[in-house]
Image (cartoon, grey):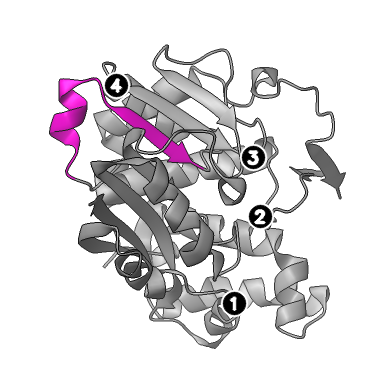
Amino acid sequence: MGINYSKFRSSTKFHNLRRSISSVNLSSTSLIKKNFRDDFKFIDGRRYHNVENIYYFFPNDEQEIDRLQLQHYMMRFIWCSNFSSPVRDLLDEGGARVLDVGCGPATWVLEMASDFPKCVFTGVDIVPVMPLTIKPQNANFIEANLLEGLPFPDNHFDFTYIRFLNCAFPFNLWSTHAIPELIRVTKPGGYIEIMEWEVEICYQGPITRRFMDAHVRIPEKMASFLQDSGKLKNINNESRDSPIGKHGGKVGTLALENSISAFKLCESKFAEELGMSLEEYNALFDHYKKEVDEYKSQVRTHRFWAEKI
């Protein structure tokens, strides 16, 4: 059931996307406007957020930016699109305002701004890891924390997008803070789209199950979070399965590398939750690599989108 990577590798669109983003040089010093001041801290040679009252525990250095860019290209290939909401006609027409919350290095924003030059795109993140000078004229970036309120008026954006922030804040804050704030800044008739990993890997073995047990399963509740808001209609949920491991060819191998990198970034947190030492935790990865091929494991991503009433 592996994806044929020759199609992935030879895709003209894929290579054009990579060239357009690489030309921006996201790993350059133009990403950092404040010379590291107090926004960052360094632990074991990795750079992390140093902002109070946030829950996101992944680093934000060049190595992590590379991982996030690779993850973006994988998702773009698997889904054959950057979004699922029915907003393409609006974006083609122009004049729309689009918001990406938790934009990180802004790969999504940069592509969308290039694809839809008549619209205005705004990326928001808690620290400045996005390009601040070399960017399309219709792309803007702001430092802000979703949980503290976004610096925009009510009913401002036609399309509000957020993805892979499962680790950004506790489970309960999705319904009490995150989703209400996304709704607030979106216009009536506008769309909100949320993309998340399905933490429960399909066809998993015992080692994989131990990694999965350390996660909170946000996608299982997302549809009900959106429904319970009482301010959204036309709520949709679509998912895609893709292989993880060498059995899935190049894409599966990249997905495996991405997952291991993410698990290792969380090693202290997950080892503690699993009641293991760091040595015991890291010893699992050799077994994990073999297991995903033995079980022909698949990883699932979800997109949820809904229209504001």
Q: Would you name the residue on which mark 1 appears?
A: 211
Do the numbered discs 1 and 2 sit on residues whose CB atoms are within 8 Å?
A: no
Q: Is residue 14 visible?
A: yes
Q: Is residue 134 above or below residue 108?
A: above
- C-alpha separation, residue under disc 4 versus residue under disc 1: 41 Å
Of tags 2 and 4, the one toward the viewer is 4
Name the quadrant of the N terminus: bottom left
Q: Callout 3, which amino acid? A: Ile
Of tags 4 and 1, the one toward the viewer is 4
Q: Nearer the viewer, residue 114 or 39?
A: 39
Residue 177: horizontal and vertical position, in percent?
52, 58
What residue lies at 41% left-to-right and 81% top-to-bottom?
295
Q: Callout 1, which amino acid? A: Phe
Mark 3 and mark 4 lie on one chain; the one further toward the N terminus is 4
Q: Would you name the residue on which mark 3 appears?
A: 126
Do the numbered discs 2 and 3 sit on residues whose CB atoms are within 8 Å?
A: yes
Mark 1 and mark 3 lie on one chain; the one further toward the N terminus is 3
What residue lies at 40% left-to-right and 46% top-to-bottom?
184
Residue 97, magenta (yes or no): yes
Q: Would you name the residue on which mark 4 appears?
A: 119
- Count neighbours of disc 3 (C-alpha within 10 A) and say few if under 14, some if 14 to 19, many if 20 or more: many
Q: Which residues are magenta?
A: 86-101
